Amino acid sequence: MFPTIMIIDDEPSILKSLSGLLSDEGFEVITASNGYEGLKLIEEKSPDLVLLDIWMPGIDGIETLKEIKRHHPFLQVIIITGHGNIETAVKATKLGAFDLIEKPLSIDKIIVDINNALNFRRIEEENRYLRKKTLEKHAINGDSPAIAELRKQIAVIAPTDSWILITGENGTGKELVARTIHQFSKRAEQPMIDINCAAIPEERLESELFGHEKGAVAWSDTRKRGRFEMANSGTLFLDEIGDMSLQTQAKLLRVLQEQTFQRVGGGRDIRVDVRIVAASNKDLEAEIAQGRFREDLYYRLNEIPIHVPPLRSRTQDIPLLMRIFLEDRGKKNGPSPTGMDPEAMAMLLSYPWPGNVRELKNLIGRLMIILDKPVIAAADIPFPYNPVAGERGKSEEELFRIDQLSAAKERFEMEFIRRKFSRHGNNLTKTASVIGIDPAELRRKLRQFGVSV
């Protein structure tokens, strides 16, 4: 399919000659003799690019450009004019024109500009698509009031340039919140660079943050840019900031205040424009009281605080999260469980989830690997999520501590019959049929084992 080019010009000779040349180059061409007609045809025909004359009767090129960009912000426009000047070029560029070409027109110049503009549009469309996929991938999922409030906070603060301190337990999704803030910020087209302050050895953390010159550190013989430089014009995410030493905290504070630093071993000041988002699973105010975190750094980072709630305070989100994890793993690994029975779900809802969402995701991943059936049952849920499984493990330990085979057989028979009877809803006839004995014999054994029938 060939790109469609619209030409808006009040000179019939320009329309005729330019449309003929572009048609010869393989483009579909639409023409309009004034701005009003052009705007109407844009709505009807949806061209890929517009060649727009500046000087026209009625609505001129600049006003037409404003209307195009107001209703079709991603449509590329190239200005053509016989009265070009610096002021017009600057104004058109500020309004979103891709380029400005002066008459008399050079067909080679026009073709090059058209191809460049179409390539730029394609890249923009790909970036919008990738950004949409990124937002979907890093969506904060849940219908609970706590998550609704979290999403509302993010929507308000993300477009600002304020610095943010995210707190919450391990596994709650603090990094996910940081990435969502960046994606909805004015810096979304710029990089988000992260550094885990707890995962990097203390002697290397300064170099990782600020970079180093060649020969300045023992572990590298090349010059290296630090995370601050890499995040210039974008966002720097300082994860687990509470694990940073007091010495590095002091250096970081100075850089945060001035947004100027030197690489390790360097003498040149480097200035950056970086938005800071920090996160910690620690109570930083308690860390300050115990002398492990600088109070001035805390207040510098904590312009806007965000707390990510633990999973135990939003258990109503567990069914939705479980479905998402099941679908994601199913897409990657092929056929696997797609649901969970009510008894199994009740176990997950009653569990306190000390590892939060990450723990739930890991559990679902483990079950999908080991199970080959459509629905996860209560018996499939392992300890500690399933208390019965813990009792089962304890019973097995006790069974193998019995020395006499006859006593072990009797203990096994008792546990076997009691559990089968319970699993089948205390239905004597059904249980007897499943395990293959006479109902009267099952009744006798249940009474022998102290189970009321």
Image (cartoon, rainbow, N blue to C red):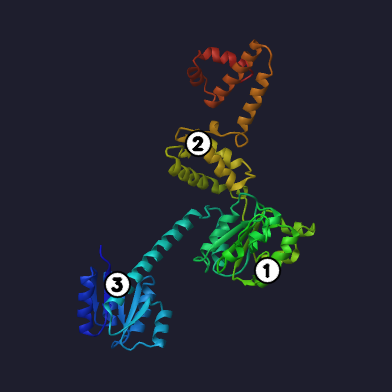
| Residue occupying image coordinates x 24% and y 69% | 27
What count of labels does the image hold? 3
Label 2 is placed on what type of residue? Answer: Ile
How far, Cα to Cα, is label 1 from label 2?
47 Å
Q: Residues within 10 Å of mark 3 (few under 14, many from 20)?
A: few
Label 3 is placed on what type of residue? Answer: Glu
- In the rendered image, the residue lying farthest to the right is 290
Quarter of the N terminus within the rendering: bottom left
Q: Can you say whether 291 is above or below 384 in the image?
A: below
Q: Residues within 10 Å of mark 2 (few under 14, many from 20)?
A: few
Is residue 93 at all visible to an observer of this figure? yes
| Residue occupying image coordinates x 51% and y 15% | 439
User: Where residue 369 is drawn, which disc sits there?
Assistant: 2
SS label for mark 1:
helix
Mark 1 = which residue? 255
Label 1 is placed on what type of residue? Answer: Val
Q: Can you say whether 152 is above or below 442 in the image?
A: below
Residue 379 percent across, percent down from the top left:
54, 31
Mark 3 = which residue? 43
